[in-house]
Image (cartoon, rainbow, N blue to C red):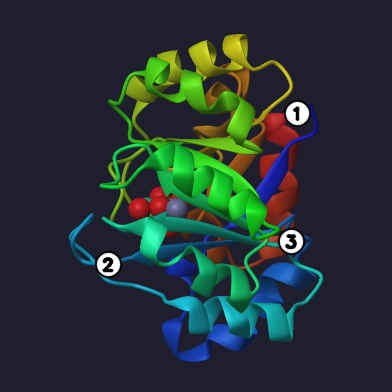
Amino acid sequence: MKPAILPSLLAADQGRLADEIRRAADAGADALHVDVMDGVFVPNLSFGPAVVELAARVAPDLPRNVHLMLAHPDRRLEQFARAGATTILVHAEAQCFVEGALRRIRALGCRAGLVLNPLTPAAAALPFLPLVDEILQMTVFPGFGGQAFMPEALPNLRALRAAAPDLGIMVDGGVARDTIAEAAAAGANLFVAGSALYRAADMAAEIAALRELAS
Ligand code: DX5
Ligand code: ZN
C-alpha cells in the first residue's frame, strides 16, 4: 500500500497557524492531522473547529484529518463536519456510543475513523471495521507531541492489518526516520508526524524521506 504522510498541526508554530498549514500543503503532505483535545479525555487543551475551518480556507486541497480526543466526541461531530473535516476519528475509549458516532460521521458526509490507545487490545476495534474508513493505532499515550514511539503498540498493528488487509491503518506518536519503517513493516500505511516534520528545516525533504522509509 502506498504510504501517506500527515503533518500534525500540534507541533506547528501556534502564532502562525495559517502559514504553518500552507507549509504542510506546499511540502507535499497527503493530509493535515488536527488534534482536538478537551482537557478531560487527555490532560491537555488544543484546537477547536475554528482551526479546521482555517485549514479548509487556506489549503482547500489538503484533506483535514481530525483526531478527536474528547470524552464526549458524539456531541461535537456536526460542528467539525460543518467546519470542513474530511475524516473524523473518535477513540474507542471515549465515553459515548461509539457505533452511533461512527455511523453519524458517515451520515454527515465525512470519512470515519476509530482510534485505539497504545494498550487497548486490537480486538476492541474488530466489531467496528465495517463502519470505518481508517483505523488509528496510537503509538504514544495521547495528549502531547514529542513523546517516544511505543513499540508495545506493534502487535496491535499486526493484528489489525491481518484483520483488515485493505483498510487504511494509521500510526500517531513518535513517528520519525528511526521508527517509521518498523511501523510500516507491522502494517501501517498512514503516518502522522508532528515534531519530525514541523521541526525539520525542509519539510518537503523530510516528507520524502519518511515516504521512502515507509515504502
Ligand atoms: C498526540 C497527538 C499526536 C501528536 C504527535 O496526542 O495525537 O498527533 O501531535 O506528535 P509527535 O509526532 O511529535 O509525536
Ligand atoms: Zn493525533
Q: Residue 145: in sight, yes or no?
A: no
Residue 38: numbered disc: 2
Q: What amino acid is labelled 2 in the image? A: Asp
Check contact, mark 3 vs mark 1: CB within 8 A: no
Check contact, mark 2 vs mark 1: CB within 8 A: no
Left or right: residue 95 compared with residue 65: left
Please tell me whether mark 1 sits on a helix, a strand or a loop: loop
Q: What amino acid is labelled 1 in the image? A: Ser
- Say if disc 3 is inside 8 Å of ligand 1: no
- The number of discs equals 3
* Among the two numbered marks 3 and 2 on one chain, the one whose residue lies closer to the N terminus: 2
Closer to the eye: label 3 or 2: 2
Q: In the rendered image of this protein, does residue 1 appear above or below residue 98?
A: above
Give the residue number, with chain letter if any, for mark 1.
215
Please tell me whether mark 2 sits on a helix, a strand or a loop: loop
Alpha carbon distance from label 3 to label 2: 31 Å
Residue 195 picture location, percent across and down? 46, 58
Q: What amino acid is labelled 3 in the image? A: Ala
Which residue does the image show at 43% across and 18% down from the upper left? 156
Which residue does the image show at 56% across and 44% down from the upper left? 103
Q: Quadrant of residue 68?
A: bottom left
Q: Residues within 10 Å of mark 1 (few under 14, many from 20)?
A: some
Alpha carbon distance from label 3 to label 1: 17 Å
Residue 212 picture location, percent across and down? 75, 36
Give the residue number, with chain letter if any, for mark 3.
204
- Say if disc 2 is inside 8 Å of ligand 1: no
* Among the two numbered marks 3 and 1 on one chain, the one whose residue lies closer to the N terminus: 3
Quarter of the figure with the C terminus: top right
